[in-house]
Image (spheres, rainbow, N blue to C red):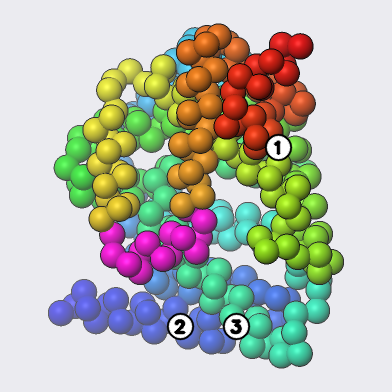
Amino acid sequence: MWHSYASGMNLFRSVQAVASASGDGAVDWNAVTDAAKASTAPGDVSLSDAQRRGYATDVRDARDRVRTVADLEFDVPDTIEIQHRHHWVDANVDTFRRVLEPLETETMTAFPGIARTVNTGTLAFMLTYLAKNVLGQYDPLLLAGEDDPDHALYFVHPNIENVAAELDVDAPRFRRWIAFHEVTHAAEFGAAPWLSDYLEERVETGLEDLSGGELTSGGFSTSEFRELNAAMTVVEGYAELLMDHAFDDEYADLRRKVDERRGGRGPLAKLTRRLLGLGLKRKQYERGKAFFEAVADDRGLAAAGRVWDGPEYLPTDDEIEDPAAWLARVDA
Protein backbone atom coordinates (compact mmCIF):
# COMPACT_ATOMS: atom_id res chain seq x y z
CA MET A 1 0.00 0.00 0.00
CA TRP A 2 2.74 2.45 0.99
CA HIS A 3 4.70 1.64 -2.19
CA SER A 4 1.64 2.43 -4.36
CA TYR A 5 1.03 5.68 -2.49
CA ALA A 6 4.68 6.73 -2.77
CA SER A 7 4.79 5.90 -6.48
CA GLY A 8 1.64 7.93 -7.04
CA MET A 9 3.06 10.93 -5.19
CA ASN A 10 6.30 10.70 -7.17
CA LEU A 11 4.35 10.64 -10.42
CA PHE A 12 2.31 13.65 -9.25
CA ARG A 13 5.48 15.58 -8.41
CA SER A 14 6.99 14.66 -11.79
CA VAL A 15 3.93 15.87 -13.73
CA GLN A 16 3.77 18.99 -11.58
CA ALA A 17 7.40 19.81 -12.38
CA VAL A 18 6.81 19.47 -16.12
CA ALA A 19 3.56 21.45 -16.04
CA SER A 20 5.28 24.32 -14.22
CA ALA A 21 8.09 24.54 -16.81
CA SER A 22 9.09 28.17 -17.23
CA GLY A 23 11.87 30.42 -18.47
CA ASP A 24 12.78 31.80 -21.88
CA GLY A 25 14.49 28.77 -23.42
CA ALA A 26 13.18 25.81 -25.36
CA VAL A 27 13.63 23.61 -22.26
CA ASP A 28 13.25 24.29 -18.56
CA TRP A 29 16.25 22.29 -17.37
CA ASN A 30 15.45 22.71 -13.69
CA ALA A 31 12.03 21.19 -14.34
CA VAL A 32 13.63 18.36 -16.33
CA THR A 33 15.84 17.55 -13.36
CA ASP A 34 13.02 17.81 -10.83
CA ALA A 35 10.63 15.67 -12.90
CA ALA A 36 13.20 12.94 -13.61
CA LYS A 37 14.17 12.72 -9.96
CA ALA A 38 10.56 12.73 -8.76
CA SER A 39 9.85 9.73 -11.00
CA THR A 40 12.93 7.78 -9.94
CA ALA A 41 13.97 6.46 -6.55
CA PRO A 42 17.66 7.30 -6.07
CA GLY A 43 18.67 3.88 -4.78
CA ASP A 44 21.33 3.02 -2.23
CA VAL A 45 25.05 3.72 -2.66
CA SER A 46 26.16 2.81 0.85
CA LEU A 47 28.85 0.39 -0.28
CA SER A 48 30.50 -2.22 1.85
CA ASP A 49 34.30 -2.23 2.00
CA ALA A 50 34.30 -5.27 -0.27
CA GLN A 51 32.12 -3.54 -2.87
CA ARG A 52 34.27 -0.42 -2.82
CA ARG A 53 37.43 -2.47 -3.28
CA GLY A 54 35.65 -4.48 -5.97
CA TYR A 55 34.93 -1.45 -8.16
CA ALA A 56 38.51 -0.19 -7.83
CA THR A 57 39.98 -3.63 -8.57
CA ASP A 58 37.68 -4.22 -11.54
CA VAL A 59 38.60 -0.90 -13.18
CA ARG A 60 42.31 -1.39 -12.53
CA ASP A 61 42.30 -4.98 -13.81
CA ALA A 62 40.28 -4.00 -16.88
CA ARG A 63 42.77 -1.24 -17.70
CA ASP A 64 45.74 -3.59 -17.38
CA ARG A 65 44.12 -6.41 -19.37
CA VAL A 66 42.97 -4.15 -22.21
CA ARG A 67 46.39 -2.48 -22.40
CA THR A 68 48.03 -5.88 -22.74
CA VAL A 69 45.56 -7.45 -25.16
CA ALA A 70 45.15 -4.49 -27.50
CA ASP A 71 48.67 -3.07 -27.11
CA LEU A 72 47.12 0.35 -26.49
CA GLU A 73 48.47 2.97 -24.13
CA PHE A 74 45.69 4.80 -22.30
CA ASP A 75 44.55 5.64 -18.82
CA VAL A 76 41.18 5.51 -17.13
CA PRO A 77 39.46 8.81 -16.29
CA ASP A 78 40.42 10.71 -13.17
CA THR A 79 36.70 10.97 -12.44
CA ILE A 80 35.30 7.55 -11.47
CA GLU A 81 31.98 7.80 -9.66
CA ILE A 82 29.79 5.21 -7.99
CA GLN A 83 26.42 6.87 -8.47
CA HIS A 84 22.81 6.45 -7.55
CA ARG A 85 20.14 7.34 -10.10
CA HIS A 86 19.79 10.99 -9.06
CA HIS A 87 23.55 11.49 -9.39
CA TRP A 88 23.32 10.08 -12.90
CA VAL A 89 20.43 12.44 -13.76
CA ASP A 90 22.46 15.46 -12.63
CA ALA A 91 25.48 14.46 -14.70
CA ASN A 92 23.47 13.77 -17.82
CA VAL A 93 21.23 16.83 -17.62
CA ASP A 94 24.46 18.81 -17.97
CA THR A 95 25.42 16.75 -21.04
CA PHE A 96 22.00 17.11 -22.69
CA ARG A 97 22.04 20.83 -21.99
CA ARG A 98 25.44 21.29 -23.64
CA VAL A 99 24.48 19.26 -26.69
CA LEU A 100 21.09 20.90 -27.23
CA GLU A 101 22.19 24.45 -26.51
CA PRO A 102 22.46 25.42 -30.23
CA LEU A 103 18.75 24.69 -30.66
CA GLU A 104 17.64 26.84 -27.74
CA THR A 105 18.40 30.11 -29.53
CA GLU A 106 15.90 29.32 -32.29
CA THR A 107 12.33 30.51 -32.35
CA MET A 108 10.34 27.49 -31.22
CA THR A 109 6.75 27.98 -32.35
CA ALA A 110 3.93 30.49 -32.18
CA PHE A 111 3.20 28.98 -28.74
CA PRO A 112 6.58 28.86 -26.97
CA GLY A 113 5.06 28.01 -23.58
CA ILE A 114 3.42 24.87 -24.93
CA ALA A 115 6.56 23.88 -26.84
CA ARG A 116 8.67 24.38 -23.71
CA THR A 117 6.36 22.13 -21.69
CA VAL A 118 6.44 19.42 -24.38
CA ASN A 119 10.24 19.60 -24.71
CA THR A 120 10.67 19.53 -20.95
CA GLY A 121 8.35 16.55 -20.58
CA THR A 122 10.04 14.63 -23.39
CA LEU A 123 13.52 15.04 -21.92
CA ALA A 124 12.32 14.25 -18.41
CA PHE A 125 10.75 11.03 -19.72
CA MET A 126 13.97 10.06 -21.51
CA LEU A 127 16.16 10.70 -18.50
CA THR A 128 13.77 8.89 -16.17
CA TYR A 129 13.84 5.75 -18.31
CA LEU A 130 17.61 5.83 -18.75
CA ALA A 131 18.29 6.54 -15.08
CA LYS A 132 16.43 3.35 -14.18
CA ASN A 133 18.32 1.24 -16.73
CA VAL A 134 21.87 2.54 -17.27
CA LEU A 135 24.45 0.31 -15.58
CA GLY A 136 27.73 1.99 -16.42
CA GLN A 137 28.75 4.89 -18.62
CA TYR A 138 32.00 6.08 -20.12
CA ASP A 139 31.42 9.75 -20.87
CA PRO A 140 33.88 11.54 -23.17
CA LEU A 141 32.09 14.79 -22.18
CA LEU A 142 31.46 15.97 -25.73
CA LEU A 143 31.00 19.74 -26.07
CA ALA A 144 32.27 20.24 -22.52
CA GLY A 145 33.77 23.54 -21.45
CA GLU A 146 37.48 24.09 -20.97
CA ASP A 147 37.16 23.82 -17.18
CA ASP A 148 35.53 20.39 -17.34
CA PRO A 149 37.50 17.13 -17.12
CA ASP A 150 38.19 15.40 -20.42
CA HIS A 151 36.16 12.32 -19.61
CA ALA A 152 34.46 10.46 -16.78
CA LEU A 153 33.43 6.95 -15.79
CA TYR A 154 30.18 6.29 -13.93
CA PHE A 155 28.70 3.16 -12.38
CA VAL A 156 25.04 3.28 -11.33
CA HIS A 157 25.33 0.93 -8.39
CA PRO A 158 21.61 0.41 -7.58
CA ASN A 159 20.91 -0.59 -11.19
CA ILE A 160 23.85 -3.02 -11.28
CA GLU A 161 22.68 -4.70 -8.07
CA ASN A 162 19.03 -4.83 -9.18
CA VAL A 163 19.75 -6.25 -12.63
CA ALA A 164 22.17 -8.85 -11.23
CA ALA A 165 19.45 -10.01 -8.84
CA GLU A 166 16.81 -9.98 -11.57
CA LEU A 167 19.01 -12.06 -13.89
CA ASP A 168 20.03 -14.36 -11.01
CA VAL A 169 23.74 -13.86 -11.66
CA ASP A 170 26.61 -13.24 -9.26
CA ALA A 171 26.64 -9.47 -8.56
CA PRO A 172 30.45 -9.05 -8.32
CA ARG A 173 30.91 -10.94 -11.60
CA PHE A 174 28.23 -8.87 -13.30
CA ARG A 175 29.78 -5.64 -11.96
CA ARG A 176 33.19 -6.71 -13.29
CA TRP A 177 31.71 -7.36 -16.74
CA ILE A 178 30.23 -3.85 -16.81
CA ALA A 179 33.54 -2.35 -15.67
CA PHE A 180 35.48 -4.10 -18.42
CA HIS A 181 33.06 -2.89 -21.07
CA GLU A 182 33.24 0.74 -19.99
CA VAL A 183 37.05 0.64 -19.73
CA THR A 184 37.24 -0.61 -23.33
CA HIS A 185 35.59 2.68 -24.32
CA ALA A 186 38.16 4.60 -22.30
CA ALA A 187 40.83 2.69 -24.23
CA GLU A 188 39.35 3.75 -27.57
CA PHE A 189 39.25 7.45 -26.74
CA GLY A 190 42.68 7.22 -25.13
CA ALA A 191 44.15 5.56 -28.23
CA ALA A 192 42.48 8.08 -30.54
CA PRO A 193 42.85 11.62 -29.12
CA TRP A 194 41.15 12.94 -32.27
CA LEU A 195 37.97 10.91 -31.72
CA SER A 196 36.20 13.34 -29.36
CA ASP A 197 36.70 16.25 -31.77
CA TYR A 198 35.57 14.09 -34.70
CA LEU A 199 32.30 13.20 -32.95
CA GLU A 200 31.80 16.74 -31.68
CA GLU A 201 32.11 18.20 -35.17
CA ARG A 202 29.45 15.87 -36.54
CA VAL A 203 27.10 16.48 -33.65
CA GLU A 204 27.54 20.25 -33.94
CA THR A 205 27.04 20.23 -37.72
CA GLY A 206 23.95 18.08 -37.34
CA LEU A 207 22.52 20.47 -34.75
CA GLU A 208 23.29 23.44 -37.00
CA ASP A 209 21.32 21.70 -39.74
CA LEU A 210 18.43 21.29 -37.32
CA SER A 211 18.52 24.88 -36.10
CA GLY A 212 18.88 26.15 -39.67
CA GLY A 213 15.84 24.23 -40.80
CA GLU A 214 17.81 21.89 -43.07
CA LEU A 215 15.94 18.83 -41.85
CA THR A 216 16.02 15.41 -43.39
CA SER A 217 13.79 12.52 -42.45
CA GLY A 218 16.23 11.65 -39.69
CA GLY A 219 16.90 15.20 -38.47
CA PHE A 220 20.61 15.30 -39.24
CA SER A 221 21.83 15.73 -42.80
CA THR A 222 22.28 12.34 -44.43
CA SER A 223 26.07 12.57 -44.73
CA GLU A 224 26.58 13.71 -41.14
CA PHE A 225 24.29 11.03 -39.80
CA ARG A 226 26.01 8.28 -41.81
CA GLU A 227 29.45 9.40 -40.63
CA LEU A 228 28.33 9.68 -37.01
CA ASN A 229 26.55 6.33 -37.13
CA ALA A 230 29.57 4.64 -38.73
CA ALA A 231 31.90 6.09 -36.08
CA MET A 232 29.65 4.95 -33.23
CA THR A 233 29.36 1.51 -34.84
CA VAL A 234 33.17 1.32 -34.78
CA VAL A 235 33.27 2.46 -31.14
CA GLU A 236 30.74 -0.16 -30.04
CA GLY A 237 32.12 -2.95 -32.23
CA TYR A 238 35.75 -2.53 -31.21
CA ALA A 239 34.70 -2.51 -27.55
CA GLU A 240 32.95 -5.85 -28.09
CA LEU A 241 36.08 -7.26 -29.75
CA LEU A 242 38.26 -6.19 -26.83
CA MET A 243 35.78 -7.64 -24.36
CA ASP A 244 36.05 -11.03 -26.07
CA HIS A 245 39.82 -10.99 -25.65
CA ALA A 246 40.28 -9.10 -22.38
CA PHE A 247 37.55 -10.28 -20.01
CA ASP A 248 38.90 -12.99 -17.75
CA ASP A 249 35.80 -15.17 -17.76
CA GLU A 250 33.17 -16.49 -20.12
CA TYR A 251 30.27 -14.08 -20.40
CA ALA A 252 27.97 -15.51 -23.05
CA ASP A 253 25.44 -16.26 -20.32
CA LEU A 254 25.47 -12.63 -19.15
CA ARG A 255 24.94 -11.30 -22.68
CA ARG A 256 22.16 -13.82 -23.32
CA LYS A 257 20.34 -12.99 -20.10
CA VAL A 258 20.61 -9.24 -20.67
CA ASP A 259 19.27 -9.63 -24.23
CA GLU A 260 16.43 -11.85 -22.99
CA ARG A 261 15.58 -9.24 -20.35
CA ARG A 262 15.30 -6.57 -23.04
CA GLY A 263 13.23 -8.79 -25.32
CA GLY A 264 10.93 -9.94 -22.54
CA ARG A 265 9.72 -6.49 -21.60
CA GLY A 266 6.23 -5.23 -22.36
CA PRO A 267 5.13 -3.17 -25.38
CA LEU A 268 5.56 0.18 -23.60
CA ALA A 269 9.19 -0.58 -22.71
CA LYS A 270 9.86 -1.74 -26.27
CA LEU A 271 8.31 1.44 -27.68
CA THR A 272 10.39 3.53 -25.30
CA ARG A 273 13.58 1.80 -26.40
CA ARG A 274 12.67 2.46 -30.02
CA LEU A 275 11.93 6.14 -29.36
CA LEU A 276 15.25 6.55 -27.54
CA GLY A 277 17.18 4.92 -30.37
CA LEU A 278 18.36 2.04 -28.20
CA GLY A 279 17.54 -0.40 -31.00
CA LEU A 280 19.98 1.53 -33.18
CA LYS A 281 22.66 1.13 -30.51
CA ARG A 282 22.09 -2.63 -30.46
CA LYS A 283 22.46 -2.70 -34.23
CA GLN A 284 25.71 -0.76 -33.89
CA TYR A 285 27.01 -3.42 -31.49
CA GLU A 286 26.13 -6.22 -33.88
CA ARG A 287 27.41 -4.60 -37.10
CA GLY A 288 30.58 -3.35 -35.44
CA LYS A 289 31.38 -6.65 -33.81
CA ALA A 290 30.89 -8.55 -37.10
CA PHE A 291 33.23 -6.09 -38.86
CA PHE A 292 36.01 -6.38 -36.29
CA GLU A 293 35.71 -10.14 -35.96
CA ALA A 294 36.23 -10.43 -39.70
CA VAL A 295 39.25 -8.11 -39.62
CA ALA A 296 40.80 -9.83 -36.58
CA ASP A 297 40.23 -13.30 -38.05
CA ASP A 298 41.97 -12.21 -41.26
CA ARG A 299 44.79 -10.00 -39.95
CA GLY A 300 44.81 -10.18 -36.15
CA LEU A 301 43.87 -7.81 -33.33
CA ALA A 302 46.56 -5.26 -34.20
CA ALA A 303 45.06 -4.74 -37.66
CA ALA A 304 41.68 -4.04 -36.10
CA GLY A 305 43.29 -1.35 -33.93
CA ARG A 306 44.37 0.61 -37.02
CA VAL A 307 40.97 2.31 -36.98
CA TRP A 308 42.39 4.60 -34.27
CA ASP A 309 45.37 5.77 -36.37
CA GLY A 310 43.34 8.73 -37.67
CA PRO A 311 39.87 9.69 -38.90
CA GLU A 312 40.81 8.62 -42.42
CA TYR A 313 41.21 5.06 -41.11
CA LEU A 314 37.62 4.82 -39.94
CA PRO A 315 35.59 2.48 -42.15
CA THR A 316 32.76 4.04 -44.07
CA ASP A 317 29.22 2.81 -43.58
CA ASP A 318 29.60 0.67 -46.71
CA GLU A 319 32.98 -0.71 -45.60
CA ILE A 320 31.50 -1.89 -42.31
CA GLU A 321 29.53 -4.35 -44.43
CA ASP A 322 32.64 -5.18 -46.48
CA PRO A 323 35.69 -5.51 -44.17
CA ALA A 324 37.86 -6.73 -47.08
CA ALA A 325 37.29 -3.40 -48.86
CA TRP A 326 38.43 -1.48 -45.77
CA LEU A 327 41.55 -3.64 -45.42
CA ALA A 328 42.37 -3.11 -49.09
CA ARG A 329 42.02 0.65 -48.69
CA VAL A 330 44.12 1.07 -45.53
CA ASP A 331 46.80 -1.31 -46.85
CA ALA A 332 47.07 0.53 -50.18
Residue 101: tell me if it is visible.
Answer: no
Residue occupied by mark 2 = 15
Indicate yes or no whether the magenta region holds residue 277: yes
| Quadrant including the C terminus | top right
- Give the magenta range: 265-278
Name the chief secondary structure element in magenta: helix
What residue is shown at x 46% (from left), y 36% (from top)?
A: 286
Q: Amino acid at mark 2?
A: Val
Q: Is residue 301 above or below residue 146?
A: above
Task: Measure how far apart labels 2 and 3 are at the Cα level.
Answer: 10 Å
Mark closer to the chain start, 2 or 3: 2
Q: Residue at x 30, y 81 (%)?
A: 8
Question: Which x, y percent locates residue 134?
Answer: 42, 50
Does residue 211 sit above or below 63 in this rendering? below
Mark 1 crowdedness (10 Å alpha carbons): few <14, some 14-19, many ≥20: some
Report which residue position mark 3 lands on.
117
